[in-house]
Image: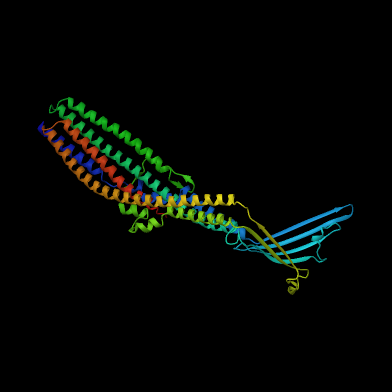
Amino acid sequence: MKTLLKYTLLLFVFVYSEIVTAQTMPVSLENALSFEEYLGYVKKYHPLMKQAELALSVGEANLLKARGGFDPKIEVDYDRKKFKNTEYYDQLNATFKIPTWYGVEFKANFEENTGEFLNPDHTVPDGGLYSAGVSFSLAQGFLINERMASLKKARFFREQAKADRDLLVNTLLFEASVAYLEWLKATNEELIYTTFLKNANVRLIAIERSVEIGEKAAIDITEARIASQNRQLNLEAASLKRRKAALIVSNYLWLNDIPMEIREEVVPVLPKLNTLEASLLLEGITDTSRLLRNHPKLLSLDAKINGLTVERSLKLNKLLPKISVQYNFLTSKIDQARTFNTENYKAFVNFSFPLFLRKARGDLRLANLKLQDANLERVSTTITLQNKIDAVYAEINSLTKQNQLVRNIVTDYKALVNAEERKFFLGESSLFIINSREQKLIDVQLKENTLLIKRLMATAGLYNTLGVSI
């Protein structure tokens, strides 16, 4: 019986060693989805990546629309009235306008009017009347006007759209990375419980044989069976968690606008730290202050502030009086340029100025408040981002130390469990102590897995906090 017990013990130790070793064996590449491959799919095919590009297109479209305010324009008015064989009037007015930057507009005009009841001031020579001139504003609308403000704000909106696009991409890749790491964490938990379920089943078989030969009490079988069932229960919960995590990862996997689902046999691969950093474009980053200055969130706020500054300048310009001036040279002979002279002209001056300026002053006050609010938001955001960066670096340093400590603890707990197993089969320990030590080993391995994933997530968090974009 001693010999049988010895062989049983050696069998258990051999199988247990194989189980412990299996935890560190590489996963078959055929059924593995690496982090680099996964993130490559997200970057290339995810719909939000295409949606992010649409933000740039919107910015370009707005800029094109604003530039349209400076497009040359042709206007033609034709008005005719005839009643009972009497031509009351027949009026044609064609105008070509060229707007310029500082509220100055160049204009060329042809006017031809006939009829028995024509308004006298519309009377022109038989061949029509040509005019060429300019119109502009002397006060309000000269240095800045609606067209100028719209174009400037559209340029800043394009910059803001680009920054918002970078933020959207950064957030998407961060969330996708977190989902992958959660899947990896759940898969590792399932592997841990699978390992210890096998261990509990081997121990149960060994104890049943020991009871058969009279070396152990029958109650030990009950305790070993309870431990095995607990491990099985934990494994089922871990498997459910892993399946749910895989479904979340599937949300980020697309191929040619078709959503993909991760098969049951596909497993994640633990990425090396430098691989993770390279995938998230963090490799070689040392100057975080430069990245902070170019952070998409701050660039977006800068563009917003610049747009509000333009709006404020426009509102300030509204405090000036409106003085509109037009001057046109007139001629009936377009083929002779010298006929344009100061003797034949048409001029127009318009002046208006509200006495209390309450609307203009109210608009200016609102513009000042919006600009002040945006500046305060930028200051607050800068401080918040800097503190987040410092916090992430502190977390990374702490988790690096914690991972080293927990690895040492796991090694020691494995030695304790192995030693307790040997003592038990030599009759110097109890199953209760073994299960207790093994539960401690399970807990610390789960903690090791958690800290490992936390360290990787901290790197992903640094990517998100720094606002790095592809």
Question: Which residue occupies the extreme bottom position in the image?
Answer: 338
Q: Is residue 309 left or right of residue 182?
A: right
- Viewer-proximal residue among 336 and 320: 320
| Residue drawn at point x = 32 percent, y = 34 percent | 237
Which of the image's four quarters has the N terminus?
Answer: top left
Of the 4 image quadrants, the one containing the C terminus is bottom left
Give percent across and percent down for residue 116. 86, 58
Residue placed most toward the observer, 311 or 318: 318
**Residue 205 at x, y percent in the picture:** 20, 31
Please indicate, yes or no, whether residue 242 appears anywhere in the rendered image: yes
Q: Position of residue 105 (x, y in %)?
A: 65, 63
Left or right: 112, with 430 as reference point: right
Residue 252 location (% of width, % of height): 43, 45
Residue 115 falls in which quadrant of the image? Answer: bottom right
* Residue at left offset 20%, top offset 41%: 17
Camera-side residue: 450 or 84? 84
Visible residue check, residue 50: no
158 relative position to 446: left or right: right
- Residue at the farthest top position: 218
How many marks the image carries: the answer is: 0
Residue at x 43%, y 46% (from the top left corner)? 253
